[in-house]
Image (cartoon, rainbow, N blue to C red):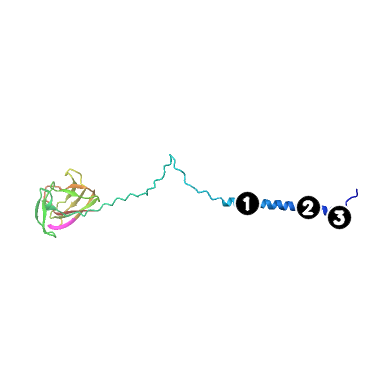
Amino acid sequence: MDPRTPTVYRTQSWRTRRRALIVLGVAVVLLLGYLIGRWQDSAAEPAAAVLPPAPTASSPAPDPSPTVSPSASPSPVAVEYPLLQAESATELNGIETEDTQDEGGGRNVGWITRNDFMRFDDFAFGEVPATKARIRVASDTGISGRIEIRLDSRDNAPVGEISVSNTGGWQNWRTDTAALTDVTGTHTVFITFTAPDDSEFLNVNWIRFDH
């Protein structure tokens, strides 16, 4: 056989390459179409709703009722204590009354010696503690004695006390203040007196507790 001429050979080679390129182009187009179709299918699928986990025996279902905070307890209110007139005590032991020259008039108690006492029943201090007592006193003697405040019994330890001395006259009045151990509730109040001897050493007009 005669060998092919170069022109015929180039023509057949070019046709072969063209067919290969056409086949490759078709394959690429088909692959792109397949990928685009898969992407559209994925985008069309709805997102799954996220649901809360179902209650189990170890995790009971939440209570739908609203939570109500307990109301705070109201703060106690301080009692405004009445003025205790000495002559109005439930009991006066060893003590006498007389007209007073103190401001406001009325009567005071006097001729007080050691071991005398006054008693006031059912005095309500309330929930806010009383911390002091103001006592209106007068004295015209060189004896220094003490006033003691006791609760519920004359034998109980004092919850407060003050020293008293000469004020310059039996009707020359002064207000002294006794600090108290905090006192609340309702009590029988005893005002007791002590001095070095049995001499009369004190007059008292009134007592007022305070916070």
Question: Mark 1 = which residue?
Answer: 37
> Marks 2/3: CA distance?
16 Å
Q: At 61% across and 51% down in the image, what residue appears?
A: 39
Badge 3 marks a residue whose secondary structure is helix
Given the image, on which type of amino acid does mark 2 rest? Arg
Identify the mark nearer the N-term, 2 or 1: 2
The percent coordinates of residue 154 (x first, y second) are 16, 44
> Marks 3/1: CA distance?
45 Å
Identify the mark nearer the N-term, 3 or 1: 3
Question: Mark 3 = which residue?
Answer: 7
Q: At 73% across and 51% down in the image, what residue appears?
A: 24
Q: Nearer the viewer, residue 195 or 206?
A: 206
Given the image, on which type of amino acid does mark 1 rest? Gly
The percent coordinates of residue 124 (x first, y second) are 19, 50
Q: Nearer the viewer, residue 201 or 43?
A: 43
Q: Which residue is at the far bottom?
A: 103
Which quadrant of the structure image shows residue 101? bottom left
Residue 168: in sight, yes or no?
A: no
Badge 2 marks a residue whose secondary structure is helix
Badge 1 marks a residue whose secondary structure is helix
Q: Badge 3 local density, few (<14 within 10 Å), some, or many (20+)? A: few
The percent coordinates of residue 17 (x first, y second) are 78, 52
Numbered mark located on residue 17 in the image: 2
The percent coordinates of residue 195 (x first, y second) are 15, 48
Q: At 77% across and 52% down in the image, what residue appears?
A: 19
Identify the mark nearer the N-term, 2 or 3: 3
Query: Magenta segment: does it hold 91?
Result: no
Query: Does the residue at mark 2 contact the one at mark 3 (Cβ under 8 Å)?
Result: no
Numbered mark located on residue 135 in the image: none
First to last magenta residue range: 170-175
